[in-house]
Image: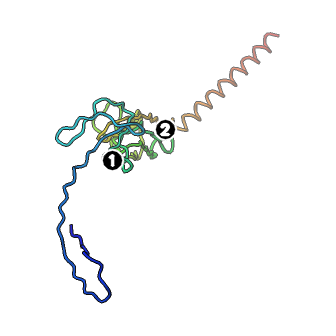
Amino acid sequence: MSIVFVYSSPGEGTEVQRQRERVHAELPLPSYFWYLTGRSSINAQTKEGISYVNNFAYKDSFACAVRGLQSFASRPVYGPKLPSVSVSPSAEIEEGSSVTLTCSSDANPAANYTWYKENEDSPKASGQIFTITDFRAEHSGSYSCGAQNKLGRQNATICLTLAPDKPIIIIIIVVIIVTLLALILIAVLLLCCCR
């Protein structure tokens, strides 16, 4: 660090020379502390420059600051909150169509996302968005989105089903109507014959 000292007030027309002086200052190392967001400091054990917090709830969020400079605290850090999963266009999908699953979770640091299908060990996809094109019967089932950062993991599940074919629905409706008409006709014939 260089500091310029002026030893006397120069008068008008006086030549001024600059001198450099070295100043050495020993400042104490900053002391960091952790606290629950919105609360007082907590007990954290420090080993080799790393702070360890043992007793906390999963929903807690933490921030750290330098003692004496608490107003300049870090952004709170916390594990992922329970993810929200949405499906577009709907959870009942027509065969051959495309479906997009979206997962989101509040977390700091930001969460990474992984998609799994029920009863399968290997992930189907990674990232917030998972798209299935050409949906088939074997795609039906529960899908789980895992949101994870270095502070924790949370999962949410959604169930996808294959919509019944429209021609089958029409056939079922026609069969029901014909059956009802036949029953009505039989009832009318029985009433007429019994008189």
Locate residue 32, reporting x and y percent: 28, 44
Provide the residue designation for mark 1.
68
Q: Amino acid at mark 1?
A: Gly
Mark-to-mark CA distance, 1 and 2: 54 Å
Residue at horizontal 17 percent and vertical 67 percent from the top: 22
Between 47 and 106, the one lying in front of the other is 47
The image position of residue 190, as x and y in percent, is: 75, 14
Vertical order, 6 against 161 (above or below): below
Report the front residue among 161 and 192: 161
186 on left or right of 97: right
Question: Where does label 2 land, which residue?
Answer: 91
Q: Quadrant of the N terminus?
A: bottom left
Q: Amino acid at mark 2?
A: Ala
Q: Position of residue 135 (x, y in %)?
A: 42, 42
Q: Quadrant of residue 37?
A: top left
Quadrant of residue 67 in the image? Answer: top left
Element class at badge 1: loop
| Secondary-structure class at tag 2 | loop
Mark closest to the chain's N terminus, 1 or 2: 1
Which residue is the extreme one toward the bottom?
13
Circle 1 crowding by C-alpha within 10 Å: few under 14, some 14–19, many from 20: few
Of residues 106 and 158, which is closer to you in this image?
Answer: 106
